[in-house]
Structures are given as structure tokens and as C-alpha cells.
Image (cartoon, rainbow, N blue to C red):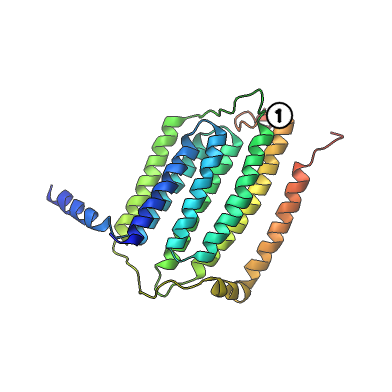
């Protein structure tokens, strides 16, 4: 109980002073939400939205580490710019593929597109 | 609590709640529109992290580009008039367990490792655009050029892929 109490005291002292770890935890929650969308949604567009959430979570991590590094290192922000560029390309390609799937199969359900398996 | 901390909690709350609506909403239109608030919340977090250029880029590209593209995808692939836009979920319980494990371990790791990391110096906000532009043109010039080619190829490929094939 003593260790739990000291953990709780530390946690309540940590909570109101926003630091690096606060941003990392928000990013972890956002990443997990995106993972849930990818794992459980059946609509292909919902899966793409989950990918966007995960990319945003990664970007928050990059920028948070860049902000809290020793001398405001800008490398993380440049990496975030490249992530945004690739996210734009990914969304365009992904939606084009989804549109093609819809024209061919009349569905965007990712479980029904399994004709290669048969 | 200072104003910075209050602002962080407000924007983190907006981001996570609207992210939950994106993921758990059964109506895909609601999900797409609540993704808007998630992107704005993330942009606000970028501002709190002194990344002004990236916040503006986030709003321009995600809200102005990717979200509109996703909405077009929703409109083009759902028969708006006849079919309801509900989308199902599969394997909810295993996915929830997996997600709880991932979120818990990532958040616990972040808390345990970096809970003492504070702001390194009180330099105050500074503009980042000039520095980022110089870095993109000097030390990151090769990835920058490759990214431009990747974007061109991706957009041409997307246009070719999404085109209707008349004779097939």
C-alpha cells in the first residue's frame, strides 16, 4: 500500500504540470484508437480514417520530442512534415483503390474482397 | 495550473473525445465530421508545442485535403439514398483487448520513462518557418526532392487507378 500511495502522490503532482509525457500519453491513446478502427471496422474508408489517426499520433510524438529536446531540435518537425506528405499520398492512393474496389465488387467491406483466396 | 496546462487539457480532451466518436460511431458521416475536430485538436497541440508552421500545415492538408477526400470517398461508395450508412464492426472484444493493452503499455512506458522531463529552457516561442525551410533546403534536400517525386507519382497513380474503365 505504501508504494501505491507514493505512486498516487507522484501521479497527482505530475498531472497538473504538462510535460513531455502528457503529450506522449495523448498520442498513445490516439494511436490505440486508430488501431481499434483498423482492427474492427469493416468499411474500408473507416480503416483509412484509422490510419490517419495513427499517423497523427506519430506526428504528435515527433513534435513533442522535438520541442522537449535539448535545444529545440527541428529534426522532429522535418520528420513530421515528411509524415504529412506521405499521409496525403497514402490517402489519395487508398481512396482510389477503394473506389476501384467499389466499382468491381459493389461493396467497400474489407472482408468481402477475398476473391484471390478462392 | 497555468494557462498552458489548462489549454493542453482542453485540446487533449477535444482530440480524444472526437477520436472516440470517429472510432466508435456507427454512422460513417458522423465519423468523418468528427475527424475534423480531431485534426483541429491535434493542430492545437502542435501550437502548444511551438510548431506553428506544422499546425497550419495540418489544418491545410488534413482538413482541407485529406478530410475532403475521405468525404468524397464516403459519398462515392455509399448509395446515399437507398442504403443506410451504418457500418458494422467485427471482433470487437479481441480488438478492444488489443487496443487496451497497446494504449496501456505505451502510456505507462511514456509516464514511467519521461515523467520528469520538463521544458529544457525558457526561450519562449519562436517562429519555425524559416528554420524549417532552411533545413529542407540544406540537410534534408534529398528526402525533400524524393518526397516531391513520390507525391507526383502517387497522384498520377491515384488518378489512373480511380479512372473508370469503359471497355472492361
Where is B27 relative to B113, above or below? above
Question: What residue sits right under mark 1 in the picture?
Answer: A105
Observer-nearest of B136 and B113? B136
Element on which disc 1 rests: helix
Q: Quadrant of residue B135?
A: bottom right
Task: Determine the residue positioned at 32% across, 65% down.
Answer: B117
Q: Quadrant of residue B150?
A: bottom right
> Quarter holding the C terminus of chain B?
top right
Q: Is residue A57 visible?
A: no
In the image, taking residue B144 as reference, residue A104 lies left or right, namely: right
Q: Is residue B106 left or right of residue B52?
A: left
Residue B85 in sight: yes
Residue count near mark 1 (Cα–Cα under 10 Å), binned few <14, some 14–19, many ≥20: few
Q: Is B83 placed above or below A110 here?
A: above
Residue A68 point in image, percent of width and height:
39, 67
Q: Residue furthest front?
A: B3
Residue in the image at 73% along x and 48% along y: B158
Q: Is residue B99 above or below residue B9?
A: above
Amino acid at each position: 500500500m505504501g508504494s501505491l500511495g507514493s505512486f498516487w502522490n507522484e501521479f497527482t503532482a505530475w498531472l497538473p504540470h504538462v510535460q513531455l509525457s502528457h503529450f506522449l500519453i495523448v498520442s498513445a491513446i490516439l494511436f490505440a484508437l486508430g488501431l481499434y478502427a483498423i482492427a474492427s471496422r469493416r468499411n474500408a474508408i473507416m480503416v483509412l480514417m484509422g490510419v490517419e489517426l495513427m499517423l497523427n499520433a506519430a506526428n504528435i510524438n515527433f513534435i513533442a520530442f522535438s520541442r522537449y529536446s535539448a535545444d529545440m531540435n527541428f529534426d522532429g518537425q522535418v520528420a513530421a512534415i515528411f509524415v504529412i506528405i506521405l499521409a496525403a499520398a497514402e490517402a489519395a492512393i487508398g481512396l482510389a483503390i477503394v473506389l476501384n474496389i467499389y466499382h468491381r465488387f459493389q461493396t467497400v467491406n474489407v472482408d468481402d474482397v477475398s476473391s484471390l483466396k478462392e | 495550473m497555468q494557462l498552458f496546462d489548462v489549454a493542453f487539457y482542453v485540446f487533449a480532451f477535444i482530440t480524444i473525445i472526437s477520436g472516440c466518436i470517429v472510432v466508435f460511431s456507427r454512422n460513417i458521416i458522423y465519423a468523418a465530421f468528427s475527424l475534423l475536430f480531431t485534426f483541429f485538436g491535434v493542430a492545437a497541440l502542435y501550437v502548444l508545442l511551438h510548431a506553428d508552421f506544422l499546425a497550419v500545415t495540418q489544418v491545410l492538408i488534413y482538413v482541407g485535403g485529406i478530410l475532403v477526400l475521405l468525404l468524397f470517398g464516403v459519398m462515392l461508395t455509399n448509395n446515399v439514398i437507398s442504403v443506410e450508412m451504418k457500418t458494422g464492426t467485427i471482433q470487437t472484444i479481441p480488438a478492444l483487448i488489443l487496443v487496451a493493452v497497446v494504449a496501456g503499455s505505451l502510456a505507462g512506458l511514456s509516464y514511467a520513462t519521461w515523467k520528469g522531463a520538463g521544458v529544457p529552457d525558457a526561450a519562449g516561442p519562436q517562429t519555425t518557418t524559416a528554420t524549417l525551410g532552411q533545413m529542407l533546403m540544406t540537410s534534408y534536400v534529398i528526402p525533400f526532392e524524393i518526397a516531391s517525386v513520390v507525391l507526383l507519382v502517387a497522384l498520377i497513380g491515384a488518378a489512373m487507378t480511380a479512372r473508370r474503365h469503359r471497355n472492361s
